[in-house]
Image: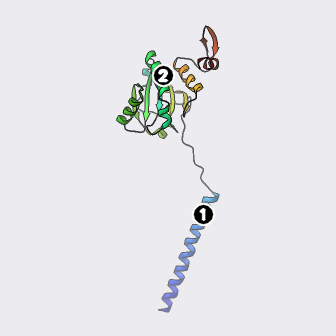
Amino acid sequence: MQSIIKKLNILANITIIIVGMIMVSLLVKRQFFRETKVAPNKVQIGTRFPLQGVKWDQSDQTLLLAIAEKCHFCTESAPFYRKLAEIWHSQNRTKTIVITPDEINEGERYVNSLGISVDEVKQARHKSLGITGTPTVVLVNGSGIVTGVWRGKLTSVQEMEILDRLKGVSPGQTIPVNGAIADHNDSIQKYK
């Protein structure tokens, strides 16, 4: 009986030593050999936008609005999105798609509650598309290539840049302003 107790005591001590060594090695690994987290892919100008089921070539450009009902900045940005809708519907050369993480019917209800008229509402996880926050506005050409990205609540300058781009004005391009020629940045100041 004494030998069994002695063997169990030795076995318990060995188990404690092994568990202790595992814990120390995990602690050392966590402290000194941290894995660097790779940042999620972000939407970048010049890359193909990964949204499936869109026929990019059916319009000159597509304006994507990545919004979510729980995002208060998205709701606060609704007046600007309504202004955008006026432009894209008057020109008939820009398709508009809202991308929402919610079910499509919920996304449509939210877009309608904001008074925004769009061509389509699609459901997708934003992060799977490289969208790291809402609201995000993405401008894509007729080949599906990203030509502009604006993240977060927009400043008036950023809003003006988007409006100019929808009107066909490229960054650095000269445009008429009150009968005179001005570059893109001048036009932003005069439109305010």
Q: Amino acid at mark 2?
A: Lys
- In the picture of the structure, the residue carrying the numbered disc 1 is 27
Count neighbours of disc 1 (C-alpha within 10 A) and say few if under 14, some if 14 to 19, many if 20 or more. few
Q: Position of residue 19 (x, y in %)?
A: 55, 71
What scheme was used to colour the molecule? rainbow
For marks 1 and 2, the one nearer the N-term is: 1
Q: Residue at x 58, y 71 (%)?
A: 20
Left or right for 56, reference 153: left
Q: Residue at x 63, y 11 (%)?
A: 181
The image's mark for residue 83 is 2
Q: CA distance from mark 1 to mark 2?
A: 55 Å
Q: Position of residue 4 (x, y in %)?
A: 48, 88
Relative height, residue 67 to residue 87 (above, below): below
Count neighbours of disc 2 (C-alpha within 10 A) and say few if under 14, some if 14 to 19, many if 20 or more. few
Relative height, residue 9 to residue 162 (above, below): below
Left or right for 27, reference 63: right
Q: Residue at x 45, y 22 (%)?
A: 85
**Camera-side residue: 109 or 137?**
109
Q: Quadrant of the C terminus?
A: top right
Relative height, residue 56 to residue 52 (above, below): above
Relative height, residue 51 to residue 119 (above, below): below
Residue 69 occupies quadrant: top left
Q: Amino acid at mark 1?
A: Leu
The residue positioned farthest toward the left in the image shown: 105
Foreground label between 1 and 2:
2
Disc 1 and disc 2 in contact, CB within 8 angstroms:
no
Left or right for 184, reference 93: right
Is residue 149 at least partly visible in the picture?
Answer: yes
Q: Residue at x 51, y 33 (%)?
A: 136
Q: Position of residue 24 (x, y in %)?
A: 60, 67
Secondary structure type for disc 1: helix
